[in-house]
Amino acid sequence: MEEKTPTQNLLDIITENEKLKKENQVLKQSLQRFKSVFDNYFNHYFQEEVSENSFIIKKLNTPIEDISLSTRLYNVLRSARVETLKEIIIFKSAKDMSKQKQMRGFGKILIAELEEVLLENKLSFGMDILSYVGKN
């Protein structure tokens, strides 16, 4: 085996160093692409979740005055001191709400109207709202 001169050794080291630099650049580019894809996915998912939560919170806090209700349903809810949709959906059902709030004149027609209003607002009786409004 032939012994290398110091100059050849130095050239080999420089060549190896250049190879390592190129490999390092390729790795950096790959990581940047991966990070970009991951960030886009995460941001998209996070924004959807935040916007859905914001939508639900806004709907929960909607005053009944701001909802299109028949005069009769509005008056029945007001007399029961219901102010927002949040105060309606905490009950398991419209009948349960009617009994607990001792609502007079709250029959099948008003129950159907109220259930339709909740459905239009993507809400329902008995839905778990703690994940949206916190455990206050």
Image: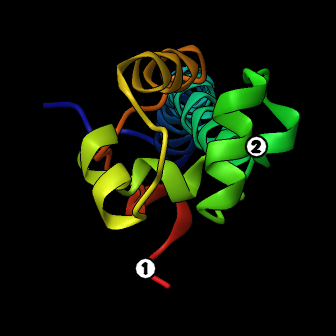
Please give the name of the residue rendered at 49% of the width and 39% of the height, measured from the top-left corner. 105
- Would you place residue 15 above or below residue 54 in this image? above
Q: Position of residue 117 (x, y in %)?
A: 58, 21
x, y percent for residue 90: 38, 57
The kind of residue tagged 2 is Ile
Q: Which residue is labeled 1 in the image?
A: 135
Kindly report the distance in space between the C-alpha atoms of the residues bearing marks 2 and 1. Answer: 23 Å
Q: Residue at x 59, y 33 (%)?
A: 52
Quadrant holding the N terminus: top left
Mark 1, other Cα within 10 Å: few <14 / some 14–19 / many ≥20: few
Whole-percent x, y for residue 63 in the image: 79, 49
- In front of the other: 69 or 32: 69
Q: Say which amino acid is labelled 1.
A: Lys
Q: Which residue is mark 2?
A: 64
Q: Secondary structure at mark 2?
A: helix
Of residues 94 and 134, the one drawn nearer to the viewer in this rendering: 94
Q: Taking the image as drawn, is residue 84 in sight?
A: no
